[in-house]
Amino acid sequence: MSPDRAPSSVAPPASAQDAAARRDAWLALLLIAGVFIAYAPALGGDLVWDDAAHVTRGALQGWDGLWRIWVEPGATQQYYPVLHTAFWVEHRLWGDATAGYHIANALQHALASLLLVLFAQRLEIRGAWIAGIAFALHPVHVESVAWISEQKNTLSLVFALAAALCWLRFDNSRRTRDWAVGFAWFLLALGTKSVTAVLPCALLVLVWWRRGRLVWKADVLPLVPWIVVGAAAGLGTAWVERHFIGADATEVGLSVVERPLLAGRAVWHYLTTFLWPTSLVFTYPRWDIRADQLAAYVYPAAVLAVTYGCWRVRARSRAPLTAWLAFTGMLFPALGFVDVYPFRYSFVADHFQYHADVALALLGGAGAAWIVSWPAATRGARGAVALVAAWLALLTWRQAGHYRDAETLYRATLARNPSSWMAHHNLGRIVSRQPGGLEEAIAHFRMAIALKPDHARAHYSLGVALQRAGRGASAVPHFEAAIRLEPNNAPVVANAEFLLGQEAMARLDGAADAVRHFERALQLKPGIAETAAALAEARRRAGAASRQSTPR
């Protein structure tokens, strides 16, 4: 018997089954309570970063909006119609109250953890509850649970695990109904987040773990429709990201050789953050991946070494290789072979590994249970497992506190990653609206520009802040830079042109320039009364100046 598998036996007597059911019920309540206690600092948190773009906006809150969520790519932040239907329903239940969304995320995370336990029990894997509790309390998952936008992670994992459980039932029963129900859950998972497209490949790895081989007709063929639909969903998401979100402008700039180097480093990053999650950050430093640097090859070499080691021990246990292949396979969509928008900030993010960590949690739970079951194991070994769970919960509680509000999140980010130009810019925008915060905001905007000179919106924000501080002349080059760097961004360009017009009006001889700026602003954003009034005044002054300069 492999050490990762629980020993098989005849069915226990009814009294033992009742005792096991009562134990499972108490452990389930303990897990749910643990999630809510660990995430308590975030449950009343405000919106952060792009949450406002995910919580259903006014134009989509009616029944026609629900229709647009499904048929109109671009109507929502990402084309995940099941996710945005969930947000639509939640908005009807509690509107803009953020606590409702945080509680929903926490409940979904707890449910996913419980489904993980059930999944392990169905497979007779040791340490099912250790795996589920570790997954539930692991701090690397805070980004997925405490960040409202990442309900796409928690909800899609619930659907994916439900699909996997149905597949296990089908694998044993070969009933069409079990296959169909599993496929329906899989479609819901894809409609929530398309990275779940890798699930059928993970299921094939699981079949190999159970039986040591794959049979085309029995194992592969039933999953072909899953693979086809998953591939279509992945390609569709890539198209939407490129055409509606801007993933083709992520400035990844990696060669064919450098992308595997990035993938190797990313896998190692996700493995180490799972094993030692003490330095988590919302935005990690963006690595400089170069093919001419020998150190860049160390990470993919290490990944290959681990893979080889798992392969070598497969005769004793297929579990390490199964978990490793499932972990790296579920990470594949975020390893850099396909460009995604967040790569412009960092090549890695905690929420990218949420689904993949299922494999590590199962392997870790099985390993811990195996060690505790040794005849030489003492109460100290069991206490060590409980101590690790408490340590994870404490780290989660501390990390969840970063998500109380956007300012707290960005300050925590900069404390660990001062090179995050995104955090500098966003924090600057927040403090610029606070009494006495203008000078700090200007410092953050300048730092963002120093780190990323082509950051058009940071130039615009700095120009606004300088103008508000009475340094309008210093603001002009930054408004001009914003226009030059993002000429197709109509809202930013229109606002910058308007503010340039105001600066021109402040000069005795600037009325003619002001006319040009106001005309451009009105062209880009027609119907703005303030701009139209400013243009009329600029034309009046320009006409008066022209008459005064004309010789009599």
Image: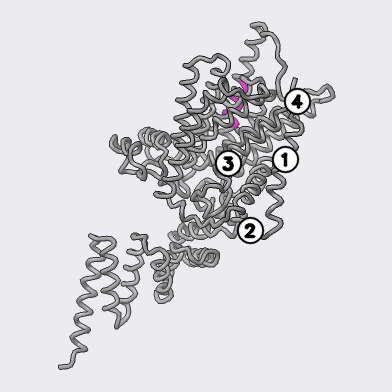
Q: Which residue is mark 3?
A: 332
Picture quadrant where residue 484 is located: bottom left
Image x and y of residue 143, in percent: 55, 43
Q: Quadrant of residue 393?
A: top right
Q: Secondary structure at mark 3?
A: helix
Tell me how far mark 2 sits from mark 1, CA to CA: 23 Å
User: Which residue is the site of mark 1?
Assistant: 306
Q: Mark 2 or 4, which is nearer the eye?
A: 2
Horizontal side of 176 relative to 377 (left or right) equals left
Q: Which residues are magenta?
A: 26-34
Location of mark 4 (residue) = 370
Identity of the residue furthest to the left in this view: 552
Query: Contact, CB < 8 Å: mark 3 with mark 1?
Result: no
Q: Residues within 10 Å of mark 3 (few under 14, many from 20)?
A: many
Report if the CB atoms under discs 2 and 1 are less than 8 Å apart: no
Q: Which of marks 1 and 3 precedes in the sequence?
A: 1
Marks 3/2 in contact by CB < 8 Å: the verdict is no
Q: Which numbered tag is attached to residue 290? A: 2
